[in-house]
Amino acid sequence: MTTESGQPVAEVTSNAQGTWQVPVDKPGKYKVTLDVSTLPQDAEVRGGNNVRNPTVFEGNPAAVLFALQAKGGAGPGGESDTTGQSTFWDQAAQLTFEGLNLGLIIALAALGLSLIYGTTGLTNFAHGELVTLGALLAYAFNSGIGLHLIPAAMIAVIVAGGLGYAQDRFFWGQLRRRGTGIIAMMIVSIGVAIFLRYLFLILFGGESQSFLQYTAQPGIQVGPISAAPKNFVAMGIELAVLVIVGLALMRTRTGKAARAVADNPALAASSGINVDRVIRIIWTMGGAIAALAGIMLGLSQNLKFTMGQDILLLIFAGVTLGGLGTAFGALVGSLIVGLFIQLSTLWVPPELKSVGALAVLIIVLLFRPQGILGRRERIG
């Protein structure tokens, strides 16, 4: 690794999981070169580019990725290579699984954001920090207190739900009662996001961390898919939570009241529904679900104070694509976003993988502005 001017910084070797870290003295643009002679004989860098040029900002670690593939692997036509290495379709199957995994994590976070928007009309830019909060709370209970990750995660979800309730009870609810406009509240949420982000930096530091359990697991092979057992369990939990919340919104009295508030708050209030109580339940649920999303995200990558910010754009993409204010729309939109992000790396460099998902978002909204499962509304 060198500076942009060519001054050497450090030379490091990745660990058994393929990760590495280089501390730098100051922010700026750097050049990272992968020594391809150190790769296994049957592996090569996808696209042949072994140089990356990340820009490092103060207090914000920069991720550098080198996607590897089997040497002489299959091209876009899907044919096998003569050495028996993985084909294009094997890679596509693996990336589809990873896309579903990522999509379910985004869907968890997007569900809370969509419910809050549906009942209050607030586009909450601080929702990414609720995702980070859940992961860091679980890490604090896991690493700081010494609890096993499972009870630590449960406590973190409960605490985050309580903090979600407190947010609306003592902050957002007060702004609503004062008649603060939606645009003003959205701008306030940006300030809240920045405040929380750097509060996390002060309390937890800027270094990447990981949970004490389930960090390094040997992968298991299921057909062409290779994944750690924690990935299958996490996907099952995510899908179960999404289905339970969706059914609760459709079948329970609170869920029906939430949908009534989302349709017409004034009419719901005149029908005897306590609108403030429903909104606080939604905020509690949204905070808890966002925390669970952060914990699941922390199982698939390292923890850092910007992890929620990093996926916030994808969360908004999933919510908007599926239809603002709809629970199942958030699920469908997020799955599409996750799949396009991962599958696009078959053709584009990993650094550009989010572009495909955002391109799909733009194309869908051109033909269906209300989103996939959204409803048309008359404006004006």
Image: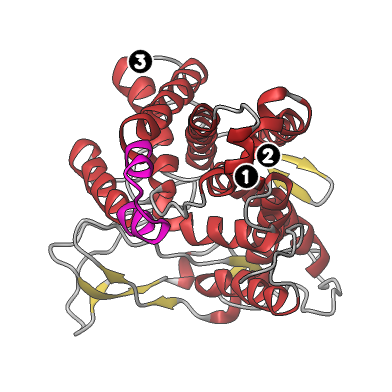
Q: For mark 2, give the secondary structure.
A: helix
- Dot 3 crowding, Cα within 10 Å, few <14, some 14–19, many 20+: few
Looking at the rendered structure, which numbered label has been put on residue 141? none
Which of the two marks, 2 or 3, is nearer to us in this view?
A: 2
The residue tagged 3 is 146
The residue tagged 1 is 262
Instruction: Name which of mark 2 and mark 3 comes first in the sequence.
Output: 3
Question: Residue lying furthest left in this view?
Answer: 25
Looking at the rendered structure, which numbered label has been put on residue 259? 2
Q: Are marks 2 and 3 in contact (CB under 8 Å)?
A: no
Instruction: Name which of mark 1 and mark 3 comes first in the sequence.
Output: 3
Q: Position of residue 373 (x, y in %)?
A: 76, 57
Q: Are marks 2 and 1 in contact (CB under 8 Å)?
A: yes
Q: Residue at x 55, y 44 (%)?
A: 109
- Dot 2 crowding, Cα within 10 Å, few <14, some 14–19, many 20+: many
Q: What separation in Å lies between label 2 and label 1 (alpha carbons)?
A: 5 Å
Q: Residue at x 36, y 56 (%)?
A: 13
Front-most of residues 132 and 40? 132
Q: How is the image coloured?
A: secondary structure
Query: Does residue 42 appear in this view?
Result: no
Q: Residue at x 31, y 44 (%)?
A: 178
Q: Main secondary structure of the magenta part?
A: helix
Identify the amino acid type marked 1.
Ala
